[in-house]
Image (spheres, grey):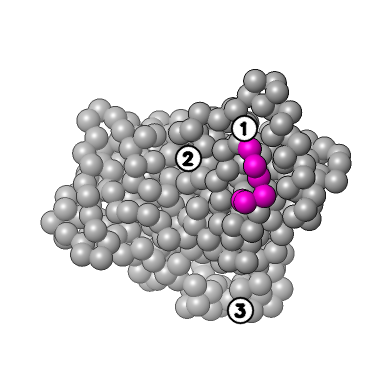
Amino acid sequence: MKTKIIEIDPQAIDLDKLSEAAEVLRNGGTVAFPTETVYGLGANALDEAALRKIFEAKGRPSDNPLIVHIAQKEDVYPLVADVPEKVTLLMEKFWPGPLTMIFRKSAAVPHIITAGLDTVAIRMPSHPVARLLIEKAGVPVAAPSANLSGKPSPTRGCHVVEDLLGRIDVIINGGDCSVGLESTVLDVTGEVPMILRPGGITKEALEEVLGEVSVDAALERKNETSLIPKSPGMKYTHYAPKAEVIVVEGDMESIVRKIRQLQQEKEKAGLKAGIMATDETKDQYENGLVISMGSRKRPETITHRLFRVLRDFDDQGVDVILAEAVERKGLGDAIMNRLLKAAGYHVIRGNGGEIK
């Protein structure tokens, strides 16, 4: 398949180029496009044949549900069975933005999107290219991340080209994604809304609107094969670079000490080690390839760079990545969710002990 690459400046959108991509979506084709979170691989959410192309291009398991993207809030109603009052409050507060909500689906939504479940995940992106593309296509757009299944999600157009050139019809290169991690997924079908995937909208932010919010215990189930995923990213190892990833937890002093030790051990074994540090610690490593993923004081800088840094290490040909853990609160929940998935839950304590 020949893939057309379309360059679009989000600050000065060429509507003719965007209309060309929208026509591809209407006609059953596949289009990768930027959102504020990561790049998505889109197809007409109401066209089963088009949706199958997403799974084929990504090598995605068929029991991994897709998120449907819409351009306007009112576009949600034909796709769902009902919209509870608390959900209307969330839509007003967080849409457009990096919040996906899981509703009871209507008959209009194909089962291939929901992996046979009676629920559907929907979000309204805030990125101007994504919103205009969906609006011009005139159809809801199902779009998982635009990468080969299991690899780090793409936050730059060049990442999409690397993974999907020759596999899809169109790639829109619209620059860097601002958030850098996939959306928060919130199940709103139960009495108490439940977070199924942490993301750019934190639990604390949701609680300000809703009061009580729970977190799915499945987030701590380490890739259980028996798990029936209600949301993307719940069952399978995700976000993994070619290199082995090891996460080191503890206070900063013990993390740095343990990573130094592990780096020496890996190098003695003939392996090239990369150190995934933070701005606060990067100068404390004397050896090895060190890349900062951002500042602990500003976790949004880490979400923005996390997947890019994982891909950078692959470009450098490292065999193992030694990654610093961050505190699990606020955006730290989302950061650690992605790091642990990338590592296959291989965690070492800075003060001794290993968890697998």
User: What is the secondary structure assignment of the residue under circle 3?
Assistant: helix
Amino acid type at image mark 1: Ala
Figure check: 216 above or below 117:
below
Q: Which residue is at a point 69% across and 69% down the rendered structure image? A: 213
- Of the numbered discs 2 and 3, the one sitting upstream in the chain is 3
Q: Nearer the viewer, mark 1 or mark 3?
A: 1
SS of the residue under disc 1: strand
Residue drawn at (65%, 20%) of the image: 270
Q: Indicate which disc, 2 or 1, sits on the residue closer to the N terminus.
A: 1
User: Dot 3 surroundings within 10 Å: few (below 14), some, or many (20 or more)?
Assistant: some
The label nearer to you, 2 versus 3, is 2
Q: Position of residue 180 (x, y in %)?
A: 48, 55
Q: Which residue in the protein does label 3 denote?
A: 209
Rendered view: 33 above or below 129: above
Residue 185 seen in this snapshot: no
Question: Foreground residue, 25 or 349?
Answer: 349
From the viewer's side, name the closer residue of 17 and 229. Answer: 17
Number of numbered discs: 3
Q: Which residue is mark 2?
A: 312
Residue 213, visible in the rendered structure:
yes
* Residue 327: image location, x then y, percent: 71, 59
In the depicted view, which residue is nearer to us: 19 or 303?
A: 303
State the quadrant of the N terminus. top left
Residue at 32% over, 54% down: 175
Q: Mark 1 Cα within 10 Å, few/some/many (few <14, many 20+)?
A: many
**Nearest to viewer (mark 2 / mark 1):** 1
**Residue occupied by mark 1:** 273
Q: Which residues are the magenta region? A: 282-287
Residue 175 lies within the magenta run? no
Q: Which residue is more in the foreground, 62 or 296?
A: 296
Tell me the SS state at disc 2: helix
Position of 112 relative to 56 (above/below): below
